[in-house]
Image (tube, rainbow, N blue to C red):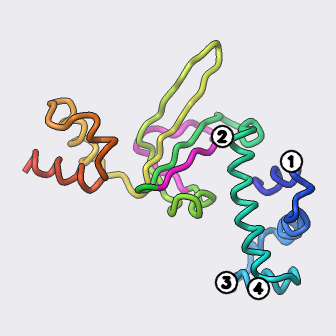
Amino acid sequence: MYSKILLEQNSDKPYSDFLSWLIDKNFYKGQNEKITIKRISADFRTETVKITKWIKEIYEQIFDLNYDKPELFQSNGVPVCLYLKYFDSSCYFYTSFPVLPREFETIRYPFTKAKVGTNLFWVKRVEHEFEEGTAKITLSLEAGYINKYREFALDKALFQGRIHYTDVFELQSYELDDKIKKIYS
């Protein structure tokens, strides 16, 4: 779907014929064997270097278009801005959901795996912003599986003043875990 949006908006790019061809082939969905760049380049009859370059450009330009024109990606359902985080990697992506996910729910978003390194996230925070009659919803997603006990222990440590709120932003997750364990051991 994102590729079709990109192609409609940028039909004159060097990769346009290739992307159109991939869409026609349904991105090799339904194939049992592993699909490699070498296989794609042989089927499209071009060099693997070009295919690799085009795939990277397509991917990056989808993110650029999403940032510049989020409304193209928010057609059905509740429009949201996703903030996805995995260690030092993060990105924003505008999309829509049939219903608004709640805190601690799990979301699989395979499209972002190449950008941040994973496709499994949990909802850390749901933020609603109202400005001049417009509502904006941002979902903060953390990679991996939720550990509710850890989150409750962190909230308790923050509430009791045993951890400063800046620690949450400045420390790595494992460093914060060590602090929480020392407090409650």
**171 and 30: which is toward the camera:** 171
**First along the sequence among labels 3 and 1:** 1
At 66% from the left and 40% from the top, the residue drawn is 96
For disc 3, the neighbor class at 10 Å (few under 14, some 14 to 19, many from 20) is: few
Mark carried by residue 96: 2
Q: Three-letter amino acid code at disc 2?
A: Ser
Q: Is residue 101 above or below residue 90?
A: above
Q: Residue 18 in magenta?
A: no
In the image, which residues are magenta?
Answer: 89-108
**Which residue is label 4 attached to?**
39
The answer to whether 77 is drawn above or below residue 54 in the figure is above
Q: Residues within 10 Å of mark 1 (few under 14, many from 20)?
A: few
Are the two marked residues, 4 and 2, in contact with CB atoms closer than 8 angstroms? no
Amino acid under disc 1:
Gln
Residue in the image at 20% along x and 30% along y: 159
Q: Nearer the viewer, mark 2 or mark 1?
A: 1
Q: Is residue 36 left or right of residue 179?
A: right
